Image: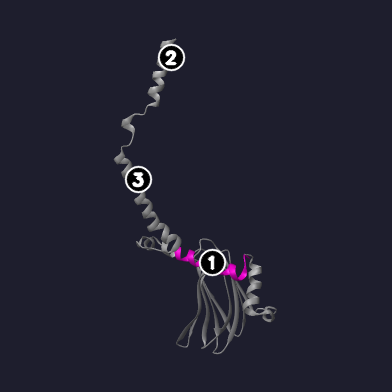
Amino acid sequence: MQLIERMCETMQLTAEKPNPALLPTPKQLRRSTIAAVIGAAFIGVGVYLPAEYGIDPTGVGNILGLTEMGEIKRQLAREAAEDEAVHGNRDQSSSLMDDIFGLFVGAAHAQEAWTDTVTFTLAPDASAEIKLVMGEGDIAEYVWVADGGRINFDLHAHGDGQSVDYDRGRGATDGAGSIEAPFPGEHGWFWRNRDDSNVAVTLQLRGTYSKLVRSE
């Protein structure tokens, strides 16, 4: 019986004692630690900073397209904060439309009918262009809302050998105002969806223009 107990104790000690040959040496541990730190630093500087904040000290983010993504995120965050400060946390398109009418068009104009309503959907990275054919001095009012994401836009005009930029934005969800044509030609918008989901756009128009031209 005592012999069996001694054998069991010997086996237990043998099982609990690690094999020194399998353990990493202090030098190997230091190398692994240094490699992990360098890898984490590279990921942070080369990937995380460009993708999250648009900061690209190494140039890797620009090559991989991460810097632009970070810049869009920062723009989205700024505009979300501005929207929160002005409008509060309201995400419904109907409430947003009412706010736009009240802020930009006015209570009286909000009761008037819109002459044209254009709706379209932009897939990721897709674009659309809508222009109004206007004469010099013509005035058109507009309001538009993007549902499902944020888009980049450029409101401009060209014609009669002239061109002008009225407004532009990145990561926008809405716009409203009026266009007074300084020269005859096509006056309107170019939209592009830089988000990763479909965005539905509704544009409402009224005022003086002879034709509405749409291209996608």
Q: Earlier in the sequence, mark 2 or mark 3?
A: 2
Q: Answer left or right for 128 relative to 142.
A: left
Q: Is residue 195 above or below residue 210?
A: above
Mark number displayed over residue 16: none
Q: Residue at 59% of width from left, 69% of height from top?
A: 85
Q: Which residue is mark 3?
A: 33
Q: Crowdedness of circle 1 by 10 Å Cα count: few (<14), some, many (20+)?
A: many
Name the residue type under label 1: Arg
Q: Is residue 7 magenta?
A: no
Tag 3, which secondary structure?
Answer: helix
Q: Amino acid at mark 2?
A: Glu
Tell me, yes or no, whether the two marked residues, 3 and 1, touch with CB atoms within 8 Å. no
Q: Quadrant of the N terminus?
A: top left
Let me know if residue 209 appears in the view. Answer: no
CA gap, disc 2 to disc 3?
44 Å
Crowding near pointer 3: few (<14 within 10 Å), some, many (20+)? Answer: few
Gap between marks 1 and 2 measured at Cα: 75 Å
**Image point (36%, 50%), residue name:** 37
Q: Determine if the magenta segment contains residue 74.
A: yes
Magenta highlight: main SS: helix
Residue placed under numbered mark 2 in the picture? 5
Position in image of residue 162 (x %, y %): 46, 86
Residue indicated by mark 1 = 150
Nearest-to-viewer mark from 1 and 2: 2
Q: Position of residue 137 (x, y in %)?
A: 56, 90
Q: Is residue 189 visible?
A: yes
Q: In the rendered view, does 92 fall on the left or right side of 67?
A: right
Dot 3 amino acid type: Thr
Coloring applied to the structure: one colour
Q: Is residue 133 above or below residue 149?
A: below
Query: Residue 157: image x %, image y %?
Result: 50, 82
Between residues 71 and 131, which one lies in front from this camera angle?
Answer: 71
